[in-house]
């Protein structure tokens, strides 16, 4: 894995978290989601860059790198979820976008 790919992956995850959780594009969907039974909790989850980043980062990383050994896959899932979650939080605070 190259450093350029790693940085591009983290920036893409931050962009995804911003688009889904804070942009005007997704506002109608978040408003619609908030009206459902558990919508208020789901909207808080989607708008939190660290929460959304954990699951999105782990899922997208695992889709790109399948592994035959289950214990390694679980570790990588958790590790990359934490890396993306932390980077989303830091990038959001530093850029003041989120």
Image (cartoon, rainbow, N blue to C red):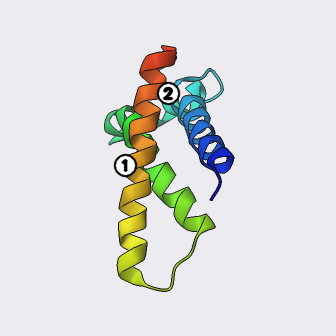
CB within 8 Å, label 1 to label 2:
no
- Asked if residue 93 is positioned above or below residue 49 in the image, the reply reads above
Residue at the image position 40 percent from the left and 41 percent from the top:
85
Residue at the image position 47 percent from the left and 37 percent from the top:
33
Q: Taking the image as drawn, is residue 93 in sight?
A: yes
**How much space separates mark 1 and mark 2, taking CA atoms?**
28 Å
Q: Secondary structure at mark 2?
A: helix
Instruction: Determine the residue located farthest toward the bottom in the rendered image.
Output: 68
- Asked if residue 71 is positioned above or below residue 82 in the image, the reply reads below
Nearer the camera: disc 1 or disc 2 = 1
Please identify the quarter of the rendering in which residue 77 is found: bottom left
Residue at the image position 61 percent from the left and 41 percent from the top:
7
Q: What residue sits right under mark 1 in the picture?
A: 82
Dot 2, crowdedness within 10 Å: few (<14), some or many (≥20)? few
- Asked if residue 19 is positioned above or below residue 13 in the image, the reply reads above
**Residue 56: image x %, image y %?**
50, 50
**Residue 51: image x %, image y %?**
37, 41
Q: Residue 35: which numbered mark, if any?
A: none
Seen from the viewer's position, the closer of residues 16 and 77 is 77
Q: Which quadrant is home to the N terminus? A: bottom right
- Answer with left or right where residue 46 lies relative to residue 65: left
Q: Earlier in the sequence, mark 1 or mark 2?
A: 2
Q: Secondary structure at mark 1?
A: helix
**Residue 40: image x %, image y %?**
34, 33
Q: Residue 31: which numbered mark, if any?
A: 2
**Residue 45: image x %, image y %?**
37, 38
- Answer with left or right where residue 25 lies relative to residue 68: right
């Amino acid at each position: 894995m190259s450093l350029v790919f790693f940085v591009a992956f983290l920036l893409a995850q931050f962009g995804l978290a911003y688009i889904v959780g804070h942009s005007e594009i997704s506002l109608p969907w978040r408003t619609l989601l908030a009206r459902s039974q558990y919508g208020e909790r789901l909207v808080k989850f989607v708008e939190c860059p660290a929460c959304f980043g954990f699951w999105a980062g782990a899922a997208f990383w695992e889709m790109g790198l399948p592994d035959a050994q289950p214990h390694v896959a679980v570790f990588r899932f958790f590790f990359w979820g934490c890396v993306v979650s932390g980077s989303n939080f830091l990038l959001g605070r530093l850029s003041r976008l989120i």
